[in-house]
Amino acid sequence: STLIPYWNSTHAAVVYDITIYQQLIYINGIIDTVFEGIVTPYEGSSSLASTTIGFGKSAAFAVTSFYGQSIIDQFLITPQTAKSSCQICNDALLVAYFPFDTNGTLNDRSAGVSPGSSSATSITSGYIQEALLFSSITNSFFQSACFPYFRRSLTFTLLLWVNPTTVSGGGTIVHASSDQNGNGTLCFDMFGMTLNGTIILQTVQNSTLTTAFAGPIQATNT
């Protein structure tokens, strides 16, 4: 089993599936421990029963005179539902998800809940339901905050559908910055297009902007 490190947020999940008598522990979205066997599930029936959230004194798993100290966030119980591995992984690792649909266009659908704002945009038909349309003016953008810094020591995945109406002159698809106004000590175009429409991905290494990957030329209206 995995040891939980000090001063580092760890996503932990426990799943009990009564249909197959299986108990699973997930750490950061990955299965850590599996136990199979007939175990009687907890069935609370008393109106006076209570659940204590947080570290306390445990005679079974810890020194009886020791009280643990920690930070706990986003505690969730899903009764009558044994979440799948995919659902647990999304809960642990998905930082933001913006479908840009008509209902709650700028709302974040991930567990992180980082609502966005936009300027000079509108809703149009997209590849999947609706999409966000940017006009040709300078201040047409979508912005959201509270994301972790994109450091080279962290693995990440960024996914989106993009349909450019023109590729002449290049353009920014995703701009990352440490300040809300688009500037700051961390400030660069992470994902964009060159003058001829070539898709590029850039990273920052030791304060130096580096083109990490250059992809194909993106055709218009596709």
Image (spheres, rainbow, N blue to C red):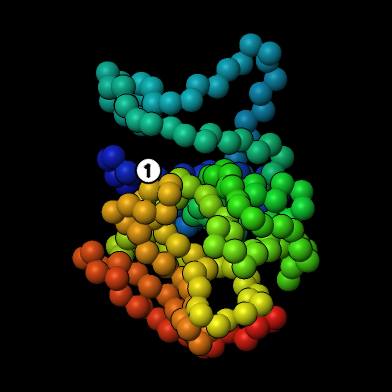
- Amino acid type of disc 1? Ser
In the rendered image of this protein, does residue 75 appear above or below residue 28? Answer: above
Q: Position of residue 51 (x, y in %)?
A: 55, 22
Write the residue at 29% across / 71% down: 209
Front residue of this view, candidates 73 and 217: 217
Do we see residue 122 in this rendering? yes
- Write the residue at 70% across / 81% down: 221
Can residue 33 be seen here?
no
The C terminus, quarter of image = bottom right
Q: Residue furthest left?
A: 206
Q: Measured along the vertical axis of the image, is residue 117 above or below residue 126? A: above
Identify the residue at image location x=46%, y=81%. Answer: 194
Q: Secondary structure at mark 1?
A: loop
The residue where tag 1 is placed is: 9
**Quick check: 107 left or right of 5?**
right
Relative image position of residue 56 (x, y in whole percent): 38, 22
Residue 53: x and y in percent read 48, 25
Q: Is residue 26 left or right of residue 164?
A: left
Between 49 and 182, the residue placed more toward the observer is 182
Viewer-nearest residue: 129 or 9 = 129
Image location (x, y in percent) of residue 49: 61, 16
